[in-house]
Structure formats: C-alpha cells, structure tokens
Image (tube, grey):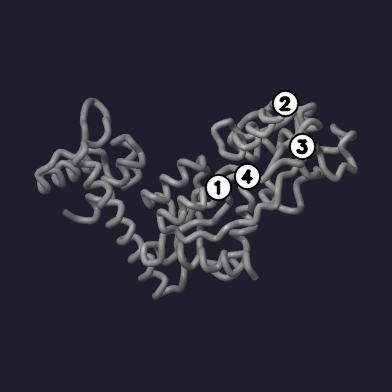
C-alpha cells in the first residue's frame, strides 16, 4: 500500500467516475484501475462495486475510505508544513462556501493576503449540508457558511462565528424609484416586488421562504439561480431586487445600486468560518483561520 493508491481512492470518491478520477490523479484510466485493483489484492478486500461504470463502494470500501481520507489529509498537511518551513506559508487552500453568507469572501481573502501573500485559493460553492459533509471528509480545508452551533461543538470543529447583521434588499433606484429613501421594508412591502433569489435548496433561501410563508405572503421570483453574479446582473438591469445577508456584498456595490434593511427575524443557524480541530487542521488552514480570527476581532 502506498499514498498514491489512497489518493486515487479519495479522488474516485470525489469524482464518482473512473475517467475523471484518473484525470484528477494525473494518470491514465488503466493505470488508476490497475493501482486500485492492486490495493484490493494487497488488502484481500473488494473495495469498489464495478459494472460498466463506477457503482459506488462496498461496505468494506467505505471503511477503508474513511481511513484513506484521514491519511491523505495528514500527508497533504505534512507536505504543506514542509513547504511553509522552507518558503513561508504558501500553497493552495481549498475553501467551501455557501452562495450567500454574512461576509464577503473576496474582502476576507484580500485581508488575509495582506499577511499571507503566497496563499492561493480554490473555492467551491456548496449548499450548507454539502459544506458540512465536505468538512467531515476533508475535501475542503475551510468552510464558510451557516451551521448549527451544537453541530460544530459535537464535531469538535474550530469555528469563528460571524456577526448576524440582518438582511437587506438590493435594488436599482432607476427601475424602483418608489424604494428610494426607504430605511427599511416589511415583508408585505417586499412581496409586491419582483425578486432575484438563490435556489430553494439553499439555506438562506429556505430561511427567506419560511418567514414569508409564516406571514401568509407569496414571493414573485423572476430569477432563481445559484450564481450570485447572475443575481447581481438581474438587479443591475432592473429585472428584480435581491434579498441578501448584510455583509455578503462589499460596501461598494456595482453601479448605482442601493440598499435598504429588511425587517425579518434572525436566522436559526449562525454564519461561521470553520476548520478541523487543532492538530487535524492543515497548517495552511490553521494559518488562515488564525488570521481570519485576528481580522474579525481586531
């Protein structure tokens, strides 16, 4: 057994496809299949359900995979630690983030880069539930999203909570002049507006929907997408208005867009920046987390 076989196994779990796992591993598909078969032969266990395509892992494979994730995570952490000892903190940090949270990710990354200029980032946009799973399986180093505080404590994650500053409506005053000068809006006022919102599978959208439903109000959603960029474009051209957590968008929004507060109860989950517990987080993740904590509390 060697580390590459375990990396191939983890890549197969992530890609759920032999060809894509081979590409992610920078080897040919026959090489990946041969190395995984050698691992099965060495262990004396069948790890993978095979048909014409990848058909998941056997129960034994799932057990081995849980160990493989841990070993690969430690191995990658060791490589990063060696690089940081030689060259200072640098490398690529894997971040999982929900589409709308209580902090602007680019602003946060820019602040961290002032201290760690050699850090690069690979960002995956996930649902809140996918994010928790990715943190547990070590497929991301850092999670930024909405969590149940009890869950974070139970799983022993390090978490820096984000302040809940409420919810705001973003609009273009040219297309919605009736909103200009409004300091805040009630739900009944927003129900009359065309809206650009995230998909209903996302936690923030479910939170919005539930409060309008409880108030006996319906939403007119003219644009629904997971892309914040597309939502902002919809607002810029006057297609509709965007409901967003305060802090998710930079203070200076594109064009002449304006904001007003939304009167709505707070979320049950709490925004947080999360990494693994001390000793299990990668060195890069720990450096990043410590700097985020210093920046947020400074």
Residue wearing tag 4: 267
Q: Secondary structure at mark 2?
A: loop
Q: Secondary structure at mark 3?
A: helix
Q: Where is residue 172, by image quadrant?
A: top right
**Which label number is shown at residue 146?**
1
Q: Secondary structure at mark 1?
A: strand
Is residue 24 visible to us here?
A: yes
Q: Nearer the viewer, residue 190 or 124?
A: 190
Residue wearing tag 2: 217
CB-based contact (under 8 Å), mark 4 and mark 1: yes
Quarter of the figure that contains the N terminus: bottom left
Q: Earlier in the sequence, mark 3 or mark 1?
A: 1
Q: Foreground mark, 2 or 3?
A: 2
**Which label number is shown at residue 205?**
none
Q: Residues within 10 Å of mark 3 (few under 14, many from 20)?
A: many
CB-based contact (under 8 Å), mark 4 and mark 3: no
Q: Earlier in the sequence, mark 1 or mark 2?
A: 1
- Residue 122, position as x, y percentages in the image: 49, 52
Relative placement, left or right, of 178 versus 64 is: right
Residue at (54, 52) in percent of width and height: 144
**Which label number is shown at residue 236?**
3
Residue at (42, 47) in percent of width and height: 134
Quarter of the figure that contains the C terminus: bottom right
């Amino acid at each position: 057994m060697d580390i590459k076989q375990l990396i191939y196994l983890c890549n197969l779990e992530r890609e759920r496809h032999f060809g894509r796992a081979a590409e992610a591993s920078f080897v040919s598909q026959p090489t990946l299949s041969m190395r995984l078969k050698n691992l099965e032969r060495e262990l004396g266990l069948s790890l993978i359900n095979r048909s014409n395509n990848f058909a998941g892992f056997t129960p034994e494979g799932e057990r081995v995979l849980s160990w493989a994730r841990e070993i690969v995570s430690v191995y990658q952490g060791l490589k990063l630690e060696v690089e940081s000892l030689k060259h200072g903190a640098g490398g690529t940090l894997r971040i999982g983030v929900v589409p709308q949270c209580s902090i602007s990710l680019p602003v946060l990354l820019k602040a961290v880069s002032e201290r760690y200029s050699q850090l690069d980032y690979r960002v995956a946009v996930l649902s809140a539930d996918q994010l928790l799973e990715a943190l547990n399986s070590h497929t991301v180093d850092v999670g930024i999203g909405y969590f149940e505080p009890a869950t974070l404590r139970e799983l022993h994650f390090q978490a820096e909570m984000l302040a809940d500053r409420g919810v705001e409506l973003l609009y273009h005053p040219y297309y919605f002049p009736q909103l200009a000068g409004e300091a805040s809006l009630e739900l009944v006022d927003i129900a009359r507006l065309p809206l650009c919102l995230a998909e209903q599978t996302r936690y923030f959208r479910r939170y919005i929907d539930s409060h309008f439903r409880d108030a006996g109000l319906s939403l007119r959603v003219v644009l629904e997408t997971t892309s914040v960029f597309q939502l902002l474009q919809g607002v810029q051209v006057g297609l509709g208005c965007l409901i967003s957590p305060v802090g998710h968008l930079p203070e200076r929004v594109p064009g002449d867009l304006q904001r007003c507060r939304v009167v709505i109860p707070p979320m049950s989950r709490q925004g947080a920046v999360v990494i693994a517990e001390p000793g299990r987080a990668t060195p890069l993740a720990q450096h990043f987390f410590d700097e985020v904590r210093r920046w947020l509390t400074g």
